[in-house]
Image (cartoon, rainbow, N blue to C red):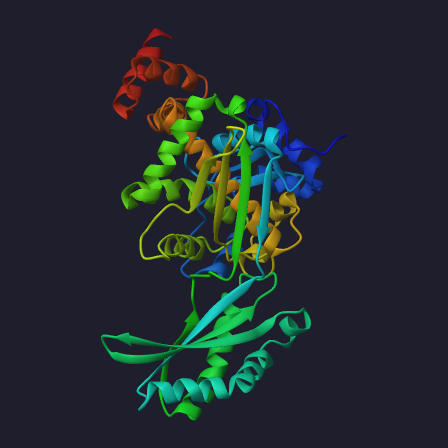
Amino acid sequence: MERTSRIPGFYKLPVEERVKIVKEFAGLTDEEASLLMKAGNLDISVADRMIENVIGTWPLPLGIATNFLINGRDYLIPMAIEEPSVVAAASNAAKMAREGGGFFTSSTDPIMISQIQLVKVKDAEEARNAILAEKQRILEIANERDPVLVRLGGGARDLEVRIIDTIMGKMVITHLIVDVRDAMGANVVNTMAEAVAPFIERITGGRVYLRILSNLADRRLASARAVWKKEEIGGDEVVEGILYAYAFAEADPYRAATHNKGIMNGIIAVARATGQDTRAIEAGAHSYAARNGRYTSLSRFWRNEDGDLEGFLEMPLAVGIVGGVANVHPIARIALKILGVKSARELSEVMVAVGLAQNFAALRALATEGIQAGHMKLHARNIAMAAGATPDIVDEVVERMLREKTIRIDVAKRIIEEIRSKK
């Protein structure tokens, strides 16, 4: 059987059939497939070790985005998200991109930055020079904290020293540049920063306060590019509409915030499914969008010489496949197995491709029928269920709300009462 993510009608299949397809695609065991079907798949004893004051778990729907072709390889993409239309939109965008070869991605080495804040020095320049003069010893102290990482080819690679002016006076900030390999890296770089802080105090006579990573991981970038053939997406007018929508986001921070939120819809859904630090990813993305002093679009779109639409997305993505929740949460482990990624870099490239797909889908919807048409159709189901619609009548309730062009919980309740009164 050919291994492909192109699965027409996947959304129409019963959950059991979807799980069966994913099981075969990813080589899941019977136990793993069974675990996916359980609503409460995080054991309370595991949850109790993950955070404090645990009283239960709060599951999200876990969906599969289909059709993704990335660097010539087919992927099924696990996405954990509560918002309707996101999984469907990503799948549709990926389907349209296949005619142009799918998504082409790349990434830089998994470099993280840890900051050591030095204050109360007599001469900031002298302190900076003293730190740089002991660069090799500082790197040695850092690497002594994680010999396993060093053996795997990672570890502290370099350091930079900056002097900044603040409301509390001059500060000397040391950036420890660390290759964290397949880890997200927060614990690694924080531990190294803690280790070198006393030495920096000793050689400068200053006082170290903060020693912590930066979530602006601008040395750890992932990028994706795709071509959407104009015939696939609705013709020249749709291409033009998307370009106008992109130009709006590029120029206006109010629009850019929502534009980038659309990108993050896809990326954070994959991040949740695979046990990543979603807050760190969000912080890095939005700070990167403002790196030139003005908040703007993370992505770029243009019309190529054939008149087709091209899109490009580059952003920091600090993700890991070893350590942390990715190794503790059973569904995160299964999600990584479904993806079949072999490194943190590959995971970041998959995620940035999903972000670009999601962004394209939103822009196309905005430039054509408007975002609400598809979104509200799916949202209507949630409203119907919240109003008390049972599975046997939920489709009828949704259909009538859409016909009345009013999707509200009071309307859903009225329709439910009318349906039940007739039975």
Q: Position of residue 386 (x, y in %)?
A: 35, 29
Q: Quadrant of the N terminus?
A: top right
Q: Residue at x 30, y 13 (%)?
A: 404
Q: Relative to 136, is 65 above or below?
A: above
Q: Nearer the viewer, residue 137 or 334?
A: 137
Q: Position of residue 15 (x, y in %)?
A: 58, 29
Taking 221 as reference, is 334 left or right? right
Q: Residue furthest left?
A: 167
Q: Residue furthest front?
A: 305
Q: Residue at x 33, y 26 (%)?
A: 387
Taking 418 as reference, is 349 left or right? right
Q: Nearer the viewer, residue 121 or 195?
A: 121
Q: Position of residue 349 (x, y in %)?
A: 57, 48
Count the marks.
0
Q: Relative to 383, is 257 above or below?
A: below
Taking 34 as reference, is 368 left or right? left
Q: Relative to 200, is 368 above or below?
A: above
Q: Quadrant of the C terminus?
A: top left
Q: Nearer the viewer, residue 4 or 98?
A: 98
Q: Nearer the viewer, residue 138 or 410?
A: 138
Q: Report if residue 198 is visible in the image.
A: no
Q: Residue at x 40, y 14 (%)?
A: 396
Q: Residue furthest right?
A: 1
Q: Report if residue 28 is visible in the image.
A: yes
Quadrant in the rendering for residue 181: bottom right
